[in-house]
């Protein structure tokens, strides 16, 4: 079999992953239009891993971890980065092989590299979720997380979803042989206007690092957290019957948006250093409570596997 | 006799669970087969990251037919009784037999359980094993409900003998047992059929899978040491890592690389820990420089470029990891040079140690106060001990320990030196956690000993006070280990301290605070505002008020609010006494376990613990060792017999007469020569014993006692204690009491067995 040529840029690696997972039958989605800490927060993963409906989606998700900001100076750490996320429900029996195929697609020659599946159990205290799986090592470097979801939002996953998460910058730097993320070609280096990762993100890393550590107004953030929390609960308290349309409409997604907001606001507050160790657990518990309520609501919707006839 | 081969083929099994899984598979299957009536010769289990394997030879082909006879009711018994018997045996009346019994004719049931063929039993046992396998964590996958450690892909289950092999008929949630398996994931992924274990092992080997984990370990160790040796270097031994790495690969290939020059100045422990924890690398030492200069990584495959790409990738990751480590190291050094370890540890005020025992900072302040108090008892300077205690845990807030918790203490010692603190304090940082186990070395530097003792005693008294003691197998706060640590510190350094006094003082301080708190809550104060302010202050901190180590602050609070009223002793003080004696018994229990391992008998320890001063553990052990050695001599065992005889006669006489014979034996009432000799011997023994006891030379004391053996034996042979003459009798009983007194001076010999 002919081995694919080596990719030349960050975006080419993303495009190849898109093409690959598209060819394997995944719906190629777009990023969720909100600030999230990881691709798992996208409702295409969190909510869609619940209930009995089959699902297969792949997408890039810009992710923010305010505490990881290093003003663009650290070669590997960013407060804004990209995750590539694949979620297939039920997890297919050949998911490991499918995953290895994706590594070949982005130019990793499995005949020359050492790929290992090393135990790593995943748990998200804010989402009330856990699963078992591995971190995948390529020559000793973690290139992906591979997880079989067992529980999300406090609900047992039946069937089980298989989730793959690629840390795109790290993976691409490895494949392209780059030592500092800011030096990584974003588009093809032979383009009329070649752009490096740093040309696009160095300044924003500086701006957001300053914002996250010093600029963000903590009083406002605290208030927003309370607002999001209250709004989430208010939306879920509506009766399922919508008087305008006469339909059954549970506002699981709009409520979940508020849960995502609360989670990100918590991350910002954490980066600002205004949350003590004891408060930290309490905040995480509050976000988890919202995530659980949203999950409870989602499983009473059609996409969550709810069928009117089953209720009769 | 057939051979049974089982392979459970799955996605990658965590390395740390493989040993457990091998043992469990072997035990569950063999137990199940034996219980069902089969026998087997030899069983062996293997594991790789993707397979669990069991092979049994000499398996019997079927279970024996079982015949059971059961006696039923009499033939004349009521109908209901007969029906009940039929129900319980599952037979009909015409299948029962009438037999003669002592009381007439009774029904007998003869139940035959036919034997079952091995394949049927194997299928049943294996299914049960898979469905109930006690993985530490297991999962579902896809649409299924079956649980396994990771998705289970295939089951190989084969019975074979000289005539051929047959697959055991078994289907678990759609996974049908077969005779095939697959080779190495990358080097030989195709599936192939096997006919028995020999064939299986040979084909796996050809398919680049080394089945036996101990063989993989041997390969790794051999290749890695050779690689190092070839360059004049040596591999740092790490058994745990070797086992783990052998559980991560089916075909190990060792590759060696060098650590870049920029990182060689990092502490060797940092290099080693970073490489082991993050990348599972072995460290390679240069014997000439004594530094860690290289590493060995173990890949799971051979490649056309002989591992060049793999090694290059690993080097890149290593360099990123060590850059992080260097960043932590330099960051921490900057912090200690500007703010000192005190500044580094400031954040410990926000870290909870235990919600009823306050913050880490509060705990450290308690330990510091205690270390100061203990210091004179261990020959340490109180100022140094206190100062050390205040900084020994600061490295918990360092970036390096945040990343590598196992480097706690060690990093503290590096940072203490960098800050220019005394060598004693640096040593205390590293050593105050010791000893961690029964075989761990005991520190001897006095400042370290003071802090180590204070740390452990604070932990023990704290958890005792909030009633979180170990029960049965549960000891979540490792209190048994802490107590053993105290014991080993005391004994290892020959320390003389009354543990009872140390701990009761701590419990009393707690009681004082609690009493004060109660008093404030209960007292009617004229000014409601003042009361609520003080109440708040106490409630808010509650036990943490003690934990903050602020007894003085509280007393000051009370006096400023209340005009200096001192609380009187309360129920809390009773509780404190209880806790003290309870904790002391805990120490004694741990001491018994410890001394038992040292070969000292249980009853010897009891005899010694019955003596005063039993909270001075060094004294206890001195006595125990002398007594233990004494009991191994012939004189010793005989003297004990003599003592016991004297004591029995005396105890009986005392019980009968209702008096205590303890004084006034006079040689002038002695009649027999043996009696006079004994008087003389006792006088001599007493005279010799006094200086020996004063200098705690128990061996000499017991040797002196041993000299009493012959006179005592002779006395008992020649003399009748219960003489006709009451004066003579009383004199002899009082004489026996002198034997008792002398013999009881080292230990309470009545506690000895036999």
Image (cartoon, coloured by chain):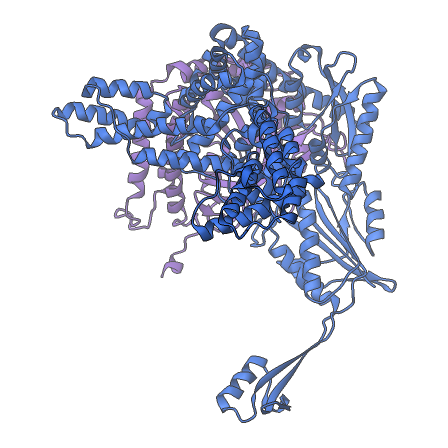
Chain colours: A purple, B blue
x 47%, y 48%: residue:
B654
Find the residue positioned furthest to the right: B162
- Asked whether the viewer can see residue B141, the reply is yes
Going by the image, does B181 lie left or right of B81? right
Whether B291 is drawn above or below B198: the answer is: above
Residue closest to the eye, A218 or B672: B672
> The N terminus of chain B appears in which quarter of the rendering?
bottom right
Q: Position of residue A19 (x, y in %)?
A: 61, 34
In the picture provided, is B555 more to the left or to the right than B403? left
B272 to the left or right of B501: right
Q: Quadrant of residue A103?
A: top right
In the image, residue B28 above or below residue B663: below
Residue A23, percent across and down? 62, 40
Q: Is residue A19 visible?
A: no
The percent position of residue B12, horizontal first and vertical second, equals: 67, 42
Total marks placed: 0
- Which of B290/B380 is in front? B380
Q: Which residue occupies 78% across, 26% down?
A: B255
Q: Is residue B411 left or right of residue B239?
A: left
Question: Residue A213: where, in percent of width, then height?
Answer: 42, 16
Above/below status of B472 relative to B451: below
Residue drawn at x 50%, y 27% is: B456
């Amino acid at each position: 079999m002919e081995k694919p040529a080596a990719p030349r840029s960050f975006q080419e690696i993303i495009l190849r992953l898109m093409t690959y997972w598209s060819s394997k039958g995944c719906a190629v989605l777009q990023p969720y239009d909100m600030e999230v800490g990881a691709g798992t927060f996208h409702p295409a993963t969190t909510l869609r891993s619940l209930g009995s409906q089959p699902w297969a989606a792949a997408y890039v998700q810009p992710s923010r971890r305010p505490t990881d900001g290093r003003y663009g100076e650290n070669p590997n750490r960013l407060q804004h980065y990209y995750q590539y996320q694949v979620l297939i429900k039920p997890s297919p029996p050949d998911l490991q092989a499918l995953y290895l195929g994706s590594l070949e697609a982005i130019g990793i020659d499995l005949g020359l590299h050492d790929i290992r599946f090393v135990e790593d159990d995943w748990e998200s205290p804010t989402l009330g979720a856990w699963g078992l799986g591995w971190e995948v090592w390529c020559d000793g470097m973690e290139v992906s997380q591979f997880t079989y979801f067992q529980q999300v939002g406090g609900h047992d996953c039946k069937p089980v979803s298989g989730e793959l998460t690629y840390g795109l910058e790290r993976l691409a730097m490895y494949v392209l042989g780059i030592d500092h993320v800011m030096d990584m070609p974003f588009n093809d280096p032979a383009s009329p206007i070649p752009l490096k990762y740093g040309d696009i993100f160095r300044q924003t890393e500086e701006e957001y690092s300053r914002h996250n550590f010093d600029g963000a107004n903590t009083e406002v953030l605290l208030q927003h957290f309370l607002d999001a929390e209250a709004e989430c609960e208010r939306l879920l308290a509506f009766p399922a019957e919508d008087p305008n349309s006469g339909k059954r409409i549970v506002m699981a997604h709009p409520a979940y948006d508020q849960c995502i907001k609360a989670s990100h606001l918590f991350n910002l507050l954490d980066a600002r250093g205004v949350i003590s160790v004891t408060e930290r657990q309490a905040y995480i518990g509050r976000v988890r409570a919202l995530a659980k309520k949203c999950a409870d609501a989602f499983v009473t919707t059609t996409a969550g596997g709810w069928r009117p006839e089953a209720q009769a | 006799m057939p051979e049974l081969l089982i392979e459970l083929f799955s996605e990658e099994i965590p390395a740390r669970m493989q040993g457990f899984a091998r043992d469990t598979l072997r035990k569950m299957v063999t137990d199940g087969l034996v219980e069902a009536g089969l026998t087997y010769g030899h069983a062996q289990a293997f594991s790789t990251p993707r397979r669990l394997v069991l092979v049994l030879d000499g398996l019997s082909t079927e279970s024996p037919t079982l015949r059971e006879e059961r006696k039923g009711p009499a033939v004349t018994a009521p109908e209901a009784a007969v029906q009940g018997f039929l129900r319980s045996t599952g037979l009909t009346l015409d299948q029962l037999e009438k037999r003669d019994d002592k009381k007439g004719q009774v029904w007998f049931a003869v139940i035959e359980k036919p034997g079952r063929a091995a394949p049927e039993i194997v299928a049943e046992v294996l299914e049960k094993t898979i469905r109930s396998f006690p993985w530490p964590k297991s999962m579902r996958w896809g649409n299924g409900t079956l649980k396994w450690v990771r998705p289970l892909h295939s089951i190989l289950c084969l019975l074979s003998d000289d005539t051929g092999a047959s697959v055991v008929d078994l289907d678990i949630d759609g996974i049908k047992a077969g005779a095939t398996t697959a080779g190495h994931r990358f080097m030989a992924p195709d599936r192939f059929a096997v006919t028995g274990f020999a064939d299986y092992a040979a084909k796996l080997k050809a398919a680049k899978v080394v089945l036996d984990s101990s063989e993989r370990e041997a390969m790794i160790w051999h290749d890695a040491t050779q690689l190092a040796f070839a360059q004049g270097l040596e591999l740092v031994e790490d058994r745990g890592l070797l086992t783990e790495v052998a559980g991560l690969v089916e075909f190990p290939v060792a590759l060696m690389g060098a650590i870049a020059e920029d990182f060689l100045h990092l502490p060797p422990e940092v290099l080693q820990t970073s490489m082991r924890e993050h990348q599972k690398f072995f460290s390679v030492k240069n014997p000439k420089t004594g530094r860690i200069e290289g590493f060995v990584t173990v890949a799971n495959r051979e490649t056309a470029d002989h591992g060049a790409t793999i090694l290059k990738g690993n080097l890149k990751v290593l360099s990123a990891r060590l850059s992080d480590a260097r960043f932590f190291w330099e960051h921490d050094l900057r912090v200690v040079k500007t703010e000192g370890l005190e500044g580094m540890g400031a954040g410990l005020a926000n870290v909870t140690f235990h919600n009823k025992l306050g913050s880490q900072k509060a705990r450290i302040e308690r330990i510091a106060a205690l270390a100061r108090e203990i210091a004179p008892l261990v020959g340490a300077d109180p100022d140094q001990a206190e100062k050390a205690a205040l900084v020994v845990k600061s490295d918990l807030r360092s970036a390096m320990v945040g990343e590598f918790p196992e480097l706690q203490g060690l990093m503290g010692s590096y940072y203490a030196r960098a800050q220019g603190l005394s060598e004693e304090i640096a040593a205390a940082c590293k050593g105050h956690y010791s000893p961690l186990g029964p075989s761990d070395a005991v520190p001897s530097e006095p400042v370290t000993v003071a802090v180590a003792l204070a740390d452990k005693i604070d932990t023990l008294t704290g958890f005792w006070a909030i009633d979180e003691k170990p029960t049965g197998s549960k000891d979540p706060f490792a209190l048994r280990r802490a107590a053993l640590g105290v014991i080993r510190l005391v004994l290892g350094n020959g320390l003389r301290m009354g543990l009872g006094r140390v701990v009761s003082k701590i419990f009393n301080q707690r009681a004082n605070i609690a009493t004060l708190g109660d008093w404030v809550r209960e007292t009617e104060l004229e000014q409601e505002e003042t009361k609520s302010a003080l109440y708040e202050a106490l409630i808010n901190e509650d036990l943490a008020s003690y934990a903050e180590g602020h007894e003085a602050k509280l007393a000051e609070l009370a006096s400023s609010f209340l005009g200096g009223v001192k609380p009187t002793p309360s129920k809390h003080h009773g509780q404190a006494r209880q806790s003290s004696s309870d904790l002391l018994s805990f120490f004694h229990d741990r001491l018994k376990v410890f001394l038992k391992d040292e070969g000292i008998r249980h009853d010897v320890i009891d005899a010694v613990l019955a003596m005063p001063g039993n909270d001075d553990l060094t004294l206890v052990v001195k006595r125990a060792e002398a007594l233990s050695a004494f009991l191994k001599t012939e004189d010793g065992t005989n003297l004990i017999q003599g003592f016991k005889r004297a004591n029995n006669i005396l105890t009986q006489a005392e019980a009968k007469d209702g008096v205590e014979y303890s004084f006034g034996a006079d040689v002038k009432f002695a009649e027999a020569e043996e009696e006079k000799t004994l008087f003389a011997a006792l006088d001599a023994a007493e005279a010799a014993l006094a200086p020996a006891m004063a200098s705690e030379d128990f061996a000499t004391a017991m040797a002196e006692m041993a000299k009493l053996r012959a006179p005592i034996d002779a006395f008992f042979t020649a003399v009748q204690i219960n003489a006709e003459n009451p004066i003579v009798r009383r004199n002899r009983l009082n004489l026996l009491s002198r034997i008792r007194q002398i013999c009881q001076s080292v230990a309470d010999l009545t506690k000895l067995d036999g």
